[in-house]
Amino acid sequence: MNKITIFGRLTKDVEVNSTASGKKYGKFSIACTGKKKDESGERKVDFFDCVIFDKGAEIVEQYFKKGDPIFVVGQMESKRTSEGKVFWNVVVDEFDFVSGKKESKDVKSVEVAEEETANLPF
């Protein structure tokens, strides 16, 4: 089973584009602060690149901005470049609105239909 659950904050606004066939997708990155501290007393921060498709991309673009908290569930997907480098993305299956300090939002869950991601080129 390939499943990942992430809670963090957007590092920048969502970028929405379309594939050659017209399928919408959104790209964003989430920063997550770990529990353990390093030698200097700072908590480690991990960054996760995410991609979401169709209606989910439109909703995330409309309601989430840089710094907003978000909860996502998805699958890890790897891509290998021609140079042999491997990049990982989280293909988002569902996400939740999370109330944060900036402003309060109703908590809602959005699930992305599996068929929306089945025939994508990446």
Image: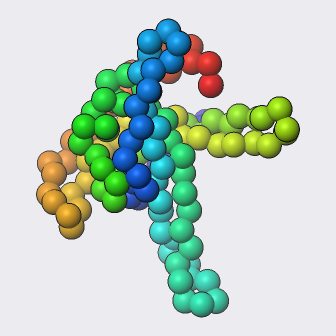
**Left or right for 95, reference 32:** left
Name the outermost residue toward the bottom. Answer: 40
- The residue positioned 65% from the left and 43% from the top of the image is 88
In the image, residue 48 sits, relative to residue 27, either above or below, namely: below
**Which residue lies most toward the top here?**
21
Report the side of 84 relative to 65 (left or right): right
Q: Quadrant of the N terminus?
A: top right
Relative to 59, 83 lies left or right:
right
Quarter of the picture holding the C terminus: top right
Task: Answer above or below: position of 56 versus 27.
Answer: above
Q: Is residue 35 visible?
A: yes
Residue 33, given in percent of the width and then of the height, sits at 48, 68
Colour convention of the picture = rainbow
Q: Is residue 69 visible?
A: no
* Whole-percent x, y for residue 109 in the image: 27, 39
Number of numbered discs = 0
User: Height in image: 77 above or below 101?
Assistant: above
Viewer-proximal residue among 81 and 101: 81
Depicted 100 relative to depicted 6: above or below: below
- Residue most extreme to the right: 83
Give the residue at x 53% y 12%.
20
Percent of width and height locating residue 67:
34, 59
The structure residue drawn at horizontal position 30% and vertical position 50%, both measured from the top left corner, is: 65
Q: Quadrant of residue 87?
A: top right
**Where in the figure is residue 108, as x and y percent of width and height?**
21, 42
